[in-house]
C-alpha cells in the first residue's frame, strides 16, 4: 500500500495503477488533497436532445484509458467532488465529472435541498448519455459510472436509462421508481451503504437488492457498520469515516479494474 502523500508517491501510484487495478488494491485514496490544475479541463459536451444545448463537465486523465463518469452529491460540483474525480484519474481512469446544476453550488443543507428538489431527472439522463458518448468517442474502450448520495441515485438511474455503460458503483443513493427500472439494468454493479443511513435505510437497500436479484442483475452490496450517510465525504468530519471510505474505494477500484480494463 502507498502511505506517503508526497508528489513522487502519487506519480508512482499513477504509473503503476493499470497493473494494480487487475487485483485487489490498497491505494491511498485520501492522500490526494488538492487539484492539480494542469490535469483538469472544463468541457461543454454537445447534447443530442433536450432543452439544453450542452452538458458542462470536467475531465481528468488519459483519454485512452477506461472512462468513469463521476456524479455529484446534492451540494453541486464543489472542490470536494472535483478532488474525488481526480483521485479516480490517478487510479488509472479517464474521469468525467458532470455538473448537473450548471455552476450552482450549495453552501448549506437548505440550499442543497432546493437544488436537489429542482433537479430534472430525465434531463440528467440526457447529460449522462452525452458523457458516455463523449468518453467513448474520445477513446475510452469502456465506460463506467459512479456517484455519491444524489449521484449514487443518478448512477442507478443511468444504468437503467442510458446506453453504453459497462459497470456502475453506487454510494448510498436510491432513485425514485419513476426513473429506475431494474429489468433494464444490463451492466454489473456494486453498492456501498451505511448502516445508520435513514435515507437509504437497510430495509430499502435489501428491497433494492431483492429487486435486482429478481431481474438477474449481477450486483454485490456492501454494508458498513456504525457509519452514516456520506461517510466517504472527507470534507464533512461529522460523518466521514476514513477506514470505511478507504475500504469502499479499494473495492470500487478493484471492481472497475475487473470490469473496464
Image (tube, rainbow, N blue to C red):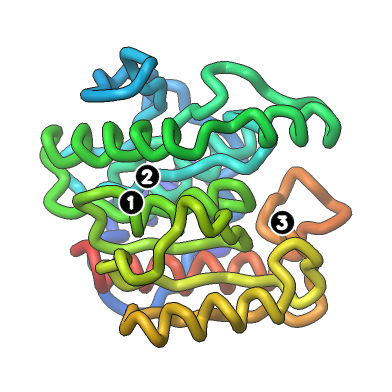
* Residue 222 falls in image quadrant: bottom right
- How far across and down, in percent of the image, does residue 63 sit? 19, 37
Report if residue 66 is visible in the image. Answer: no
Work out how far the residue at label 2 is from the one at label 3, CA to CA, in angstroms.
19 Å
- On the image, numbered disc 2 is attached to which residue? 69
- Picture residue at 37% right of the left edge, 72% below the top: 254
Position of 16 with respect to 242 (left or right) is: left
Give the crowd class for mark 1: few <14, some 14-19, many >=20 residues within 10 Å.
Answer: some
Residue occupying image coordinates x 31% and y 55%: 144
Above or below for 170 versus 43: below
Q: Position of residue 101 (x, y in %)?
A: 56, 24
* Residue drawn at the location 85% of the way across and 31% of the way down: 110
Residue under label 1: 161
Query: Going by the picture, which residue comes out furthest to the top?
Result: 53
Q: Earlier in the sequence, mark 2 or mark 1?
A: 2
Q: CA distance from mark 3 to mark 1?
A: 25 Å
Residue 201: horizontal and vertical position, in percent?
73, 72
Q: Secondary structure at mark 1?
A: helix
- 3D distance between C-alphas at marks 2 and 1: 15 Å
Amino acid at each position: 500500500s502507498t502511505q506517503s502523500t508526497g508528489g513522487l508517491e502519487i506519480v508512482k501510484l499513477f504509473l503503476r495503477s493499470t497493473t494494480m487495478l487487475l487485483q485487489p488494491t490498497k491505494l491511498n485514496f485520501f492522500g490526494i488533497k488538492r487539484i492539480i490544475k494542469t490535469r483538469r479541463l472544463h468541457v461543454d459536451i454537445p447534447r443530442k436532445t433536450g432543452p439544453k444545448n450542452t452538458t458542462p463537465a470536467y475531465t481528468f486523465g488519459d483519454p485512452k484509458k477506461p472512462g468513469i463518469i463521476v456524479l455529484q452529491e446534492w451540494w453541486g460540483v464543489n472542490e470536494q467532488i472535483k478532488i474525488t474525480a481526480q483521485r479516480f484519474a490517478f487510479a488509472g481512469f479517464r474521469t468525467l465529472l458532470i455538473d448537473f446544476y450548471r455552476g450552482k453550488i450549495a453552501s448549506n443543507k437548505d440550499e442543497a435541498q432546493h437544488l436537489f428538489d429542482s433537479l430534472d431527472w430525465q434531463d440528467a439522463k440526457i447529460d449522462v448519455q452525452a458523457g458516455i458518448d463523449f468518453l467513448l468517442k474520445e477513446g475510452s474502450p469502456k465506460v463506467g459510472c459512479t456517484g455519491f448520495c444524489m449521484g449514487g441515485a443518478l448512477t442507478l438511474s443511468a444504468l437503467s436509462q442510458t446506453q453504453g455503460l459497462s459497470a456502475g458503483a453506487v454510494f448510498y443513493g436510491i432513485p425514485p421508481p419513476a426513473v429506475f427500472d431494474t429489468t433494464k439494468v444490463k451492466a454489473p454493479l456494486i453498492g456501498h451503504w451505511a448502516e445508520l443511513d435513514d435515507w437509504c435505510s437497510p430495509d430499502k437497500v435489501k428491497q433494492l437488492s431483492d429487486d435486482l436479484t429478481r431481474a438477474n442483475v449481477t450486483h454485490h452490496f456492501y454494508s458498513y457498520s456504525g457509519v452514516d450517510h456520506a461517510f466517504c465525504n472527507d470534507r464533512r468530519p461529522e460523518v466521514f469515516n476514513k477506514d470505511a471510505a478507504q475500504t469502499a474505494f479499494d473495492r470500487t477500484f478493484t471492481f472497475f479494474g475487473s470490469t473496464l480494463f
